[in-house]
Amino acid sequence: MKFWQKALGVLGLWQATSIISDGKIEGPIGITRDAFNPIDENYPISAELPYGPKFGENPPPGYPIAGRKCGVKNSAKPAIRAWCSQNGCEGEAFHSFLLWLGKNESVLMLGRPADRFDVRPPESRPAGDPYVSAWGVFQPNDGFWVGVQSGPKSKKIKHPWQGDVAQEVGLPAARLKAIWDEGIALYSGSGWNEVQRGYYSAYLYHKASGHWRSLRTHIKSSGWDKAFKKAKDGYYSAQIGKVNKSYPKFVADESTLV
């Protein structure tokens, strides 16, 4: 059985549907486990860089020895295609967006730790070094994983590297698809096309979710163009600048990604 077929079968066990309400995800968008399941390593591991380009053969600081290894370049493509097929968007713009995002975050490597990954306790890290848990093809951190899972906290998957391939791809994809769809629905008489509204929404949410919520309020009241002109905050403006710069590149590459 090919990996993408197995991944599709795993993904078929759950529905990544969700509803956005006041900036929060509601509904069953992932798996809540009663126990920690064996993790799926059925993807090509990088023999020379099992812990990613930054750490090579050495586990990142604080990373469990038994944790999943880093896949080769583009190892996430089959799982992304499987998720999109399961959720009715294979070959569509959002499928291209997931590939674009994964390409920029990790070169589409499954199980890739962030270059600054360090999950040691504060007393074990050098003074001033932050806790960095970003991991995986889309590089979400601990907070994301806990936030999108349903059920009691004791049953949630605490760290992204404790999930399987289906969750590594499916949990971020489900949230970003919900944001993408919400952005499309925020028309407000705008001349922006659907792909542009979806892309700006999902990419900005990925970069700065709190600022996306603020922008969404402005879009509802005054439309997309005026909302973006109201972005005065330095960090906020910087994130919007990144989205503005990246969108033409995404459009140019979209047809070649899927």
Image (cartoon, rainbow, N blue to C red):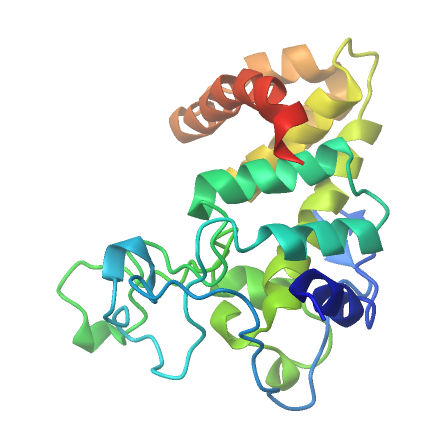
Specify the quadrant that holds the N terminus: bottom right
Taking the spot 46% from the left edge, 38% from the top edge, the residue there is 104
Q: Position of residue 219 (x, y in %)?
A: 71, 22
Determine whether 58 is above or below 211 in the image: below
Specify the quadrant that holds the C terminus: top right
Find residue 256 and report its image quarter. top right
Instruction: Check the image and name the residue furthest to the left.
Output: 127
On the question of residue 200 being in view, the answer is no
Q: Nearer the viewer, residue 110 or 45?
A: 45
On the question of residue 139 being in view, the answer is yes
Q: Position of residue 114 (x, y in %)?
A: 36, 55
Determine whether 89 is above or below 79 in the image: above
Taking the spot 73% from the left edge, 74% from the top edge, the residue there is 31
Q: Is residue 18 left or right of residue 36?
A: right
Q: Position of residue 105 (x, y in %)?
A: 45, 44
Find residue 65 and report its image quarter. bottom left
Taking the spot 77% from the left edge, 37% from the top edge, the residue there is 91
Q: Is residue 67 left or right of residue 218?
A: left
Q: Position of residue 252 (x, y in %)?
A: 59, 17
Instruction: Check the image and name the residue furthest to the bottom.
Output: 35
Q: Is residue 190 left or right of residue 163?
A: right
Q: Nearer the viewer, residue 245 or 126?
A: 245
Q: Nearer the viewer, residue 4 or 121?
A: 4
Instruction: Check the image and name the residue furthest to the front.
Output: 1
Figure disc tally: 0
